[in-house]
Amino acid sequence: MKILSIVLVFLGLNVNAQNAPLQSDSTRLLKEVKVIGTAKRKIETELKMAVSVDEFLASSENISFIKRGAYAWEPLLNNMSSERSTLTIDGMHLFGACTDKMDPITSYVESNNLSTIDIKSGQEGSMHGATVAGSIDLKRKSTPFGMEKKVNGTYQSGFEFNNNQLFNLGNASYSSQKFVADGSVSFRKAGNYYDGNNNKVNHSQYQKFNSSVGLALKASPLSCLRVDAIYDQANDVGFPALPMDLWLSRAIITSVAYKKLFEEGLVKVWDTKLYFNAIEHYMDDTTRPENLVHMDMPGWSTTYGLISKVNLKKGNYSSEIQLNAYDNLSIAEMRMYPQDRNKRTMFAYSWPWVSTRFAGLSMNNSLEVSERSQVNFGVTLGLNYNHSKYVEFNWIFHPGASQSKTRILPGLHASYQLHINEFDFSVGTGYGHRAPSVSEGYGYYIYNSFDRYDYIGNPNLKNEVSYEANASAGFTKEKMGIQAKVNYFYIENYIIGRILSLGSPMNYQSVGVKGYTFLDHAKIFNLSLNTHYNFSDDLRWKGTLTYAHAVDEQDQTLPFIRPLSYQTSLRYVKNKISLQTALNGDFTQNNYSPQYGEDETPAYVTWNISADYTFSFKKLKPVIQVGAENLLNKQYSTYADWGNIPRMGRNIFTSLKVNF
Amino acid sequence: MKKILFFLTALCFVVASCTKKKTDYEAEINTVVTEHYEFKEAVAITNSGYAISIEALNGTFYKGYNEIRLKITDKQTHIEVKASNVTFLPIITTANGQTISCPHSYSLDYQADSQYYSGYAVFTKESKTNENWDLYLSFTINGQSYSLKQNISVKEQTNKNLSMTAFTGKDEEQYFIAIVAPQKPKIAENQLIAGIYKNNKPSNPSSGVFPDPSQFSYSEVSDYVLQLDPRMPEPSMGNHSSLNNRDLIQRNDGLYAGVVNYTMTGNWTLNFILLNKNGRILKGTEVSKDFTPGVEGAKSDLFIDILF
């Protein structure tokens, strides 16, 4: 058991909940789990067993999405845009290469190379770098050493009828006492989808190929070396809400890690990783004949980084200390072609070779005060340096701005957890800074098709400063559970685009120029209510309600704030069959912000059902699933659908999963 | 393991060598702009034992503004000779036999530290087979005055950022505006320098001796203001403009300086309005500031085009 638990900790806790629920394991294992502090969730939703990363994230109550089409949704954590959260893969920083946010980091992984996604709200998420909203860490699969069954694998295939999506996902692993190999390959191809009125939504097709490989070698009984790589390529991806599509995006994400465990002493684990990733992203407007201008908009983002962390534990005190450093170079160009192609093209950088260097030290501590209560506290200190190589672009709007800027980004958080019988409570607070993103600081005429303005970065922006409070209360009894969570952010120097009276737009679709500036403050409040009730072992009900309210300094609503919304699902499992049904909906978006280009979005509700059946085929136990999303074929769009593009209508999906 | 590491490293390189090449920014601006910063001899004349050398940028006289540097040396000793009353007068003989000059500095000033006589000429036309430019020079050495005439060739200015325009103002005077700098604009704030000249109508009849400088008199106008509104005329740019531009006002050296911001490469039009020292509009019209996608931007009736 000891060896097993060490092995489990060793490889980022790859306990597959499918095989054995954590609770039924020994206390020893549970203790080790606490050291790492990861709660695991499999990459599947209540309704669907083969989901995309986006669909999986969407099932989390504090994530919402800005959708520009069927692919690469931009995750919003706590109703804050992606600049405000840190998005990482195993703690590694990556930055999208698209100025229009067509490639959030989540678009460069696939569900079959992830084990789980670790979402932390607010300053608790500052472990990997400065943040305001929190962190989303995509955890890759890594098989433990010395598994009883040496070769394992899963194959999933499916077809979705609305957009003719065909996907094939395969992953396999080999595990011996000394050597582990993980690999995955996936391919998805989808056509245009149809909305609830059975109208085709043009330019919503996509193709994605993803593969990953991970190799680990045990260097000594208590140390190992691991090499990982992900290659992702998307081709011909339509963005119906944007005036252009994606021709090609590619990412290579690599890392080398060395991990050492200590059986004695304060230090339990030391884990160091060097990483490199490169992303290239090329837009394509040639499929849009309505465009007046042909434009090339390539973007590149290259990041090198280092993570080194140690886990400490002594008695009832445990701690994680992490050193993070990275260097990113973001480049984006635009080249407009005149109507007479013999004439000179028009060129400018939308990211004028902007470097970001960050180094930060974070510490998370937890102290078990008693059997019932625990105190967590953490501190982060980061140093963020930006440099704009072609600063003359930035000088056009901000004459005399400094070419480079160094910022100190501190963060603090503390929370107290209390468990009394069936009840558990927590209160927490946080304080943290974040630096402006590349676009916010140094962007140049970045066209935003939502409000139709060209955005200009501002190198003189101050740090955004967040003051945060959160609380939760829960009650769990055998058959039922209810949990309420609230958080409140008071954000000083809240960065947002405001109309500039200067200058004129460059992109022909735009109506004006907005410059990034900061509001004196903004206030964001989020509430979520989760309940579950088990009618019997076979029949389980779950419900989630979320509410958010966010205003600027003049009490005007901020954009992209989710209206009151709910998800409720019922699941029935009997023998080899399980049936699921779910309702998802938003109430009317009464609090919308016309000054940021929003209009009122009506309420909607969609009804989804699915059924799956496990059967025996030779030695295997394949699962097949059939279901329908938006069964009633409702025509709707959500508050965060870019340009109010309609969502998918009725979608019948089928999938097959085989574990071997 | 080693093999795989090697494979991964190779993969990194494959990806690091991107699908599309990044633009070389310096080369991008050089594609249509040649910048000359070296003064070379454009014409050499020998007269009465003196060698006269006139230098211009790239050793060529171009249509538009030319800074000129004149040196006089003793032909035998190659030693610089100090002359006085050095004058410079370019005259074109047109196809129908008319003789016209262009804005120029008639008296050249001696620059003691650089040891040459400096001046400028704003050639209004290129040389053609039936239209010839001649330089009429004169100078005095040791009380002895010398005059000479030299045919020169004026070439087309291929740099589209050094253009000139000639027009008749509302006061019936003839004006010239020539761009002096920047030769190679940048996507940035650029200092814009121009010469603004007028033709001084002769007050006396010609003396009869050709060439009579009083019949070919030009001067820099003083204390005028050249209002500036730069825009991109390309239809798809919708009359795009930039910000933080400053009108051109006169500097101590007589040239006019202002600020122009170019937000991207390509065709730009500098729309001007020329005001005299009393604030009266001599030429130029206000252009629309509206953003009009798909429509070619209307130009002021006084403008100079830019291309970089």
Image (cartoon, coloured by chain):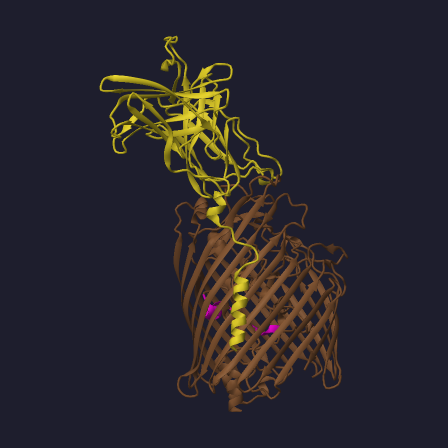
Residue A660 image-quadrant placement: bottom right
Query: From what the image shows, is residue A28 above or below residue B270?
Result: below
Residue B55 image-quadrant placement: top left
Q: How many marks?
A: 0
Query: From what the image shows, is residue A651 above or below residue A319?
Result: above
Q: Colour of chain A?
A: brown
Asked if the stretch drawn in magenta spans residue B3, the answer is no
The answer to whether residue A75 is seen in the rendering is no
Q: Residue at x 43, y 66 (%)?
A: A431
Q: Toward the viewer: A512 or B111?
A: B111
Q: Toward the viewer: A542 or A635?
A: A635
Asked if the stretch drawn in magenta spans residue A128, the answer is yes
Residue A312 image-quadrant placement: bottom left
Q: Which residues are magenta?
A: A112-129
On the image, the x and y values in percent for residue A121 come to 52, 69
On the image, the x and y values in percent for residue A280 come to 55, 59
Query: From what the image shows, is residue B119 above or below residue B215?
Result: below
Q: Residue at x 73, y 58 (%)?
A: A195
The furthest residue to the front: B76
The furthest residue to the left: B142
On the image, the x and y values in percent for residue A99 come to 54, 54
Q: Which chain is yellow?
A: B
Q: Residue at x 54, y 88 (%)?
A: A4
Q: Residue at x 59, y 72 (%)?
A: A212
**In screen coordinates, is B148 left or right of B175?**
left
Query: From what the image shows, is residue A537 above or below residue A401?
Result: below
Q: Toward the viewer: A156 or A501?
A: A156
**In screen coordinates, is B302 left or right of A572?**
left
On the image, the x and y values in percent for residue B200 come to 40, 16
The answer to whether residue A164 is seen in the rendering is yes
